[in-house]
Amino acid sequence: MNISFKTSFKLLFSLLLSSLSFSQPDREANGKNFATRSEVIGQHGMVATSHPLATQIGLDILKQGGNAIDAAIAANAATGLMEPTGNGIGGDLFAIIWHEKSQKLYAINASGRSALGLSYDELLKELDKIEKKSIPPYDLLSVSVPGAVDGWFELHQKFGSLPMETILASPIDYAQNGFPVTEAISMRWRSSVPFLKSQPGAFESTFTIDGEGPKKGEIFKNPDLANTLSLLAKQGRDVFYEGEIAKKIDRWMKDQGGYLRLKDFETHTSEWIDPVSTNYRGYDVYQVGGNVQGTAVLQMLNILEGYDLSSMGYGTVETLHAFIETKKLVYEDRAKHYADSDFQDVPYDILLSKTYAAERRALIGEQAMKDVSTGVEVIENGDTVYLTTADNEGNMVSLIQSNFRGMGTGFVVPGLGFSFQNRGELFSTDPEHPNVYAPGKRPFHTIIPGFVMKDGKPFFSYGNMGGAYQPIGHVSILTNIIDFGMNVQEAGDAARWDHSGSSEPTGQVTDQLQTTGQVNVESGIPYEVVRQLRAKGHKVEVGNSFFGRYQGILYDHEKDVYYGASESRVDGQAAGY
């Protein structure tokens, strides 16, 4: 039989397309396919972080016989080195852990407190001197005790299996010998340097190459951080909170007119807590409460449970309107009630009740609400890293860590290799506000790890960093999976929305009472939907916002495999084996 060249080419092309079909996601949402790539599937373990090298470091720990907790610590140490634009050991940490052996979910609040030696009245006097009414982000007033290192050692003491010297070995090696800087991180790094290199301390000598942020692909080294991590590996957490490192910080703070002292480090403790939760359509969703905004995720889900989102459809005007109005209502509670549980009783019995959710839902009408969002946005763009790990025993870790504003304050004690966070900026100075500044108090935090259980079994460990956006991101990811049938990669790749203009936990307000706030959507939302939202009274702009970054691991109990996903918009990676 003679076959023409044209016919042969068509047949070959058809066969080629058939052979490639396995790589396409096997689920669609409302007839649309959102995934930029397939999920990663692993049988024995999975690591998903915002940096590919950090993912590989975590995976190597699992292959050496370490568990998910060991891998999370190693990966976090690596991201602190490789992504200082979002995190580091000068910042704080929160985590939710499923421990397979004890069949229990644990949560840790490893956030630091304000200086014991700075009273509220003294703070106001210091603010008067610099003519400020709130705590500025790049001032020594904004520095609270870094809690991440204590968080690592608490996690390790309770659940770890490998020695800390083994866990920290690769991050130390990369700090000493260098690593290539990735594209998105380079962009943020280079934009931070011109401002931060003028800060007192060793920022320029620590975080620049010839006075500039490293370019994409350029090899960066941080030998001071290598030395600090080596001290932690050999001497443990006490060297950071009682020994050599704490004493260096104490001396530097005194010289610079700062307020943290050795006593603040010596008295620091992390806190093991019970996570707060709600049930959403049969799924138990867990968050960290107290001085963290995780409760907002649960409140939003409680309100949205009253809508048939699946029938309303992903990305429709009806769905987005319900999301936006729900966010407005919940963020008013977020602004007024979330604070350090040692200083304030957060009324969870009311905030998380289905009755209260129904009352709030009843306020949502056909048009965009006004007079709900009355605050100014001060925490929209905090930079953070989120990572998640899972091992062959069934343990899963959801961990988030941050310096708050990108590279933090830019204050670097010479020889230590890290910048201090500026979380203290998020205290209110209103004496009547639950989140008002006090000595030894934990400020409000934006960073939230998420975890989902189904029928008493671990189902999904996930997070979506991005300042005030994070509860919106968590709700979007979960509804994409539960209501719209997306897989874990699709759920993160689907076009996102954001809303700003809500009241803030800092207590700051404006006189612009007649406002619906600002809605931003990614370009994947059809323009017809944008027009329909505007017709409902929403102020909508396409793009021009920060929509966070996502990682997730889903455990399929029936198949006994992990499905991993990572943010396609930036540098992250999920990998399993």
Image (cartoon, rainbow, N blue to C red):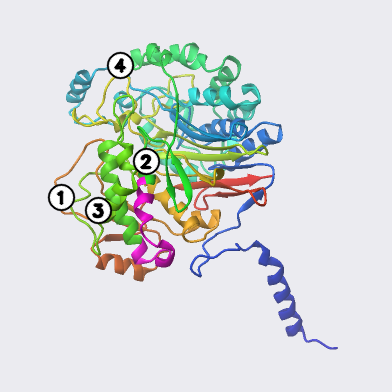
Q: Which residue is mark 4?
A: 257
Residues tagged 2 and 1 counted as in contact (Cβ below 8 A): no
Q: Which residue does the image show at 69% across and 46% down from the upper left? A: 43
- Residue 94 sits inside the magenta stretch: no
Badge 3: residue crowd in 10 Å (few <14, some 14–19, many ≥20): many
The answer to whether residue 518 is left or right of residue 196 is left
SS for dot 1: loop
Task: Identify which residue, 393 or 152, lies in the foreground.
Answer: 393
Q: Which residue is mark 2?
A: 295
SS for dot 3: loop
Q: Which residue is mark 3?
A: 517
Q: Horizontal and vertical percent for residue 282?
A: 48, 51
Q: Is residue 463 above or below residue 108?
A: below
Q: Nearer the viewer, mark 2 or mark 1?
A: 2
Q: Horizontal and vertical percent for residue 511?
A: 14, 46
- Residue 309 sits inside the magenta stretch: yes
Q: Which residue is mark 1?
A: 513
Q: Earlier in the sequence, mark 2 or mark 4?
A: 4
Residue type at mark 4: give it. Answer: Gly
The answer to whether residue 435 is left or right of residue 547 is left
Q: Quadrant of residue 290?
A: top left
Residue located farthest toward the right when viewing the structure as drawn: 1
Q: Quadrant of the C terminus?
A: top right
Alpha carbons under labels 2 and 4: distance apart: 36 Å
Q: Nearer the viewer, mark 4 or mark 3?
A: 3
Q: Is residue 429 above or below residue 233?
A: below
SS for dot 4: loop
Residues tagged 2 and 3 counted as in contact (Cβ below 8 A): no
